[in-house]
Amino acid sequence: MADLPKGSEKLLNAWAFYDWANSVYTLTIASAVFPIFYEALFSERDHYIDVFGLHLKNSALISFVTAVAFLFVAFMSPLLSGIADYVGDKKAFMKFFCYLGALSCMGLYWFNLENIYIGLVFYFLGLIGYWGSLVFYNSYLPDIAYVEQQDKISAKGYSFGYIGSVILLIINLAMIMKPKLFGITGTDGEAAMKAMRYSFVMVGVWWILFSQYTYCFLPKGNKNANRKVTHHVVFNGFKELKKVWVLLKENIALRRYLGSFFVYSMAVQTVMLVATYFGAQEIAWSSKAESTTGLIICILIIQLVAVVGAVLTSRASEKFGNIQTLIVINCIWVVFCALAFFITLPIHFYVMAGIAGLVMGGIQALSRSTYSKLLPETEDTASFFSFYDVSEKIGIVIGMLVYGIIDQITGSPRLAIVFLGVFFIVGVLLLRRVPKRDVLN
């Protein structure tokens, strides 16, 4: 099929539709069902397990594994994005990580504490597959959309993702709450756990199936590159990162924006990754059934409100500018982290879910499009977005380590959430230093 012209509606929609395909991972695996499933496995172990020669709290363990996975992605992405730009086939790399992530999600069906290491490997590879594919997915944005289109299509992608993932989560929720209606046998607890395992398989199938529409229309990559990979270009991505670093010295706006993004993004992503574990341990649910239902309902609230948040943020950026809008969103996050220290009841958690959803979709979509707008004229967009992703991943490593260490030492993650609020404050201060640019105002 001939490549569609840049800016065409069909191409933009095909790109955005990948969010529909892959966001089921972030919702079901990272945010909702898997954290509840993981907590349920430890229900009779008082949240602790002996693993890797250490006596670790379960939420600290998953935080540390997540941090290691993101550290791996941070090292891997420049290596692969440089090769992708060199050979001109970003789509092949995007597919590889998509399928790796999807198949690893299916592998979580066999996750149990008796074979904890195998389960953690599938969890680890799922993270790498999801985030690895995003390196190449995000790098397509300046290739397929003009500057004036990027805020809108970035927000549209996140909206597709929120809606698609909610549809699958509702199906999964019905399976978990009424497993016998779906032919899942066993006691209530056993049937619910089986339903959760089936939901992991459904995530993988959904991800692979719906990504095919995106692959059908996305171009291979840089049209001017059609070269074979040799040992001379294996580390080309790191050379490209060095070139990006040099260019950052000349582009003050981009450099300062990346600094602010690095700081506030580590807090955003950490909150997203640990919210369900926090809710399961720190909220006074009346029963295990209420805990499962309540946590999934909270995630649904976040996803649905996030659609509205992404659209409102896109409109706000048109009126007030990208940087000013990001400053306001970060201020809201500061308040969120302060309030999180005091919440104890389910109603508190529901309200906080609504606040989180409103600013979560907005800050993700606007951060991506703001970075895209600040890029210099270049065809090697994968390298620039690799730099963006490396900044994000290293930030997540720091955020997850901070959360895990405080959780392990104190036995409670409340102080860790408050500490993340400091990152948002620093993010605001750094955003205020970004010079005004026409594309941002």
Image (cartoon, helix red, strand yellow):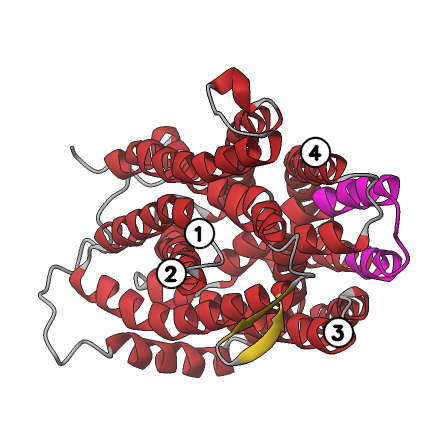
Residue occupying the point 19% across, 58% down: 88
Front residue of this view, candidates 273 and 116: 116
Q: Which residue is mark 1?
A: 111
Say if mark 4 contacts mark 2, CB within 8 Å: no
Q: Residue furthest right?
A: 342
Q: Secondary structure at mark 3?
A: helix
N-terminal-most mark, 3 or 2 = 2
Q: Disc 3 and disc 4: Cα gap in Å? A: 36 Å
Residue type of the residue flagged with mark 1: Phe
At label 1, counting other C-alpha atoms closer than 10 Å, the crowd grade (few under 14, some 14-19, many 20 or more) is many
Q: Nearer the viewer, mark 3 or mark 2?
A: 2
Q: Nearer the viewer, mark 3 or mark 4?
A: 4
Q: Which residue is mark 3?
A: 426
Q: Residue furthest top?
A: 181
Q: Is residue 296 left or right of residue 144?
A: right
At label 3, counting other C-alpha atoms closer than 10 Å, the crowd grade (few under 14, some 14-19, many 20 or more) is some
N-terminal-most mark, 1 or 3 = 1
Residue type of the residue flagged with mark 3: Val
Residue type of the residue flagged with mark 2: Ile
Q: Which residue is mark 2?
A: 118
Q: Is residue 132 left or right of residue 212?
A: right
Q: Nearer the viewer, mark 1 or mark 3?
A: 1
Q: Is residue 322 visible?
A: no
